Image: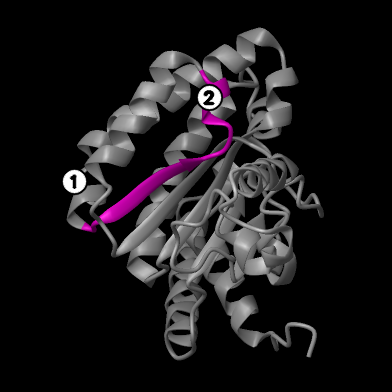
Amino acid sequence: MIYEILSIIGVYGVYERWLKNQIDSMEKPNHVGVIMDGNRRWARSQNMIPWEGHWEGADKVEEFLDWCLELGVETVTLYSFSTENFNREEEEVQELMRLFESTLEKIIKSSRIHDSRVKVRAIGRINTLPQRLQELIQEVEEVTKDYDRYYLNIAIAYGGRAEIVDALKKIASQIKSGEMEPEMIDEEVIEANLYTAHLPQPDPDLIIRTSGESRLSNFLVWQGAYSELFILDVYWPAFRKIDLMRAIRSYQLRRRRFGK
């Protein structure tokens, strides 16, 4: 058995090095969005309580961010909690809120975040979250506000349609106050009022979804209009570095025409 394991490790090592050489020779995606799906199903497959999978998924996020920094991905947007997720069982929602608090507390103290100068922002209807979580989000954003080398966006209490609605409300307020005329509304105006307006590149080049589901699930509805999709039939806690590299390699081999 030990020799079989070592053999597998050796094969993965060779494959990983080959992938690394391949993707380093071509243009990489600047912005990667991730729909981190399958935490609960992974937990059930391991005979664990369903929301224990979320904690395993959070550990995977730390690994994933390390891989992105290593590979030079400048912007990452993680779909962590949707507006619809509030409809889950109360005990699970409360556990998720505790998980988010723990994660943000780690980010505040993370040498990885500060040494790499990662600007961290939460995007979504933050005012619907518990007060303690809102305070931690404000603290994280404050301590990283001057960083501009990498960008990490945590989509929490987020919905793509809700984002567009909120953008339109802001635009309507500007029209009402006389700052803008209706005729001035175009795509650039809408983009300037989305949650992602702070990013140098709001639109993800690549969106990865785990668990094998083939849908966007209300994630970056506007920004993802021309994103390349990579669907992976593996639960998020089981996601590996070679899976990320495979996604990047697939992206590099596609011809992006943007409707032309």
Viewer-nearest of discs 2 and 1 = 2
Residues at badges 2 and 1 in contact (C-beta under 8 Å)?
Answer: no
Q: Is residue 154 left or right of residue 87?
A: left
The magenta stretch is: 116-129
> Given the image, on which type of amino acid does mark 1 rest?
Ser
Q: Quadrant of residue 185?
A: bottom right
Q: CA distance from mark 2 to mark 1?
A: 28 Å
Secondary structure at numbered mark 2: helix
Q: Position of residue 109 (x, y in %)?
A: 21, 35
> Given the image, on which type of amino acid does mark 2 rest?
Asn
The residue at which mark 1 appears reads as: 111
The residue at which mark 2 appears reads as: 127
| Residue 257 seen in the figure | yes
39 up-or-down from 226: above or below: above
| Residue 230 seen in the figure | no
Q: Is residue 103 left or right of residue 44?
A: left
